[in-house]
Amino acid sequence: MKRIIVILLSLMPLLMFAKGDKDTRLVIITIDGLRWQEVFSGAEENLISDSKQVRDTESYRRTYWRPTPELRRKALMPFVWNTVAKQGTIIGNRNLNSMMQVANKTNISYPGYCEMMTGMVDDAITGNDPVNNPHGNVLEAANKDLRYKGSVMMYGSWKSTRFAIHNEPAGIPACVSYEPAVAKNKSPRLQLAERMLEGMPHYWRSEHFDAFTYAFALETLLADHPKVMWISFGDCDEWGHARKYDFYLDAANATDAFISDIYEACEADKFYKGKTTYIITCDHGRGFGNEWTNHGSGTKGSEATWVMLFGKGINTKGETTENGPFYTKQVAATIASILDVEFMPDDGTELLPIEH
Ligand SMILES: [Zn+2]
């Protein structure tokens, strides 16, 4: 109890700061199924050395293997560990007792995104189908607020993500899985990326490659200047299911570079510079050891998640220890706090923001 009070008191100044500040932009980035193990410790030795899961173990070890977890994670996600860790707060390293997990019992994607955006768990939501979430969500609440109305957008790789925020009834422009970009102003670069996506093999049926999500989102941020953007990446989860540890590591590394580009581009644009908060998180974890490819209610450890916050209004705590358990459903309250919008989950239980 004492610790809870201390945490609450330490959050007070930031909350007050947020309430008085009306000029905020927010970029939410989700990385589907990227395990805390790789985020906090980099490549896992048994997996990167297994020629059944990595095409060229020698070259992959050269790229991602280092003698310590601190060096390995920097090799895998240099932007996270050189920039985010210095400027923001990172939660979820279970080796340091920093605990975060989903509150839903399925440990799969769609219920994870629903929980993250609605701030509650609906036990009837157990599948991954692209059906509209019946519950109100925090992005919808932002889109009803005069300060953000018409300025909330979403880009995702996987089809079901936009349904987690029932974007059509909520009036939030969103593009997922081979759909055309939703930018009002389509730059020549965006048009080229759209043409390329059309012409590429559609390797996964309900998910396009993250490179397109990145290009579409980046060009839309710079051309349309939405105040709130959710960018949802998916490659890590797909390569995980395919038991391709090499591609899974490459996807984590590429996503880190995409996030770095998005951050640099925003901070070089006067609409976003110094006014933007960034959240990076995931929808579920994966199993341990050989079970790393799986997640779900039967896969031990796949409830584990993590979150990173940086940018405007965020405390510089770096990698945190001995805290939580935080829940993914608290991300909704965190978004509401950052944007200073009123948001009450449909189940009537208001949660505390994780950090802000
Ligand atoms: Zn999955």
Image: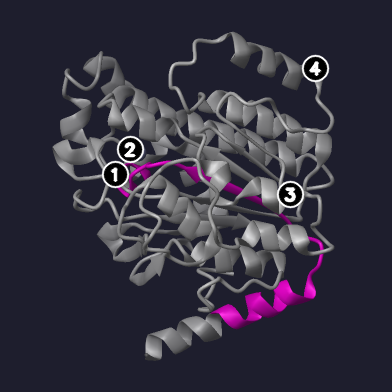
Name the residue located 71 percent from the left edge and 69 percent from the top edge. Answer: 341
The picture quadrant where one finds residue 252 is top left
Spatial CA distance of label 4 from label 3 is 26 Å
Q: Marks 3 and 2: which is nearer the front?
A: 3
Q: How many marks?
A: 4
User: Mark 4 or mark 2, which is nearer the start of the sequence?
Assistant: 2
Mark 4: few/some/many CA within 10 Å (<14, 14-19, 20+): few
Residue designated by label 1: 69
Spatial CA distance of label 1 from label 2 is 5 Å
Question: Is residue 30 one of those drawn in magenta?
Answer: yes
Local SS, label 1: helix
Local SS, label 2: helix
Residue 14 percent location from the top left of the image: 64, 75
Local SS, label 4: helix
The picture quadrant where one finds residue 13 is bottom right
Amino acid tagged 4 = Pro
Answer whether labels 1 and 2 touch (C-beta < 8 Å): yes
User: Mark 3 or mark 4, which is nearer the start of the sequence?
Assistant: 3
Residue designated by label 4: 188
355, 273: nearer the viewer: 355
Name the residue located 72 percent from the left edge and 36 percent from the top edge. Answer: 265
Spatial CA distance of label 2 from label 4 is 38 Å
Residue designated by label 3: 171
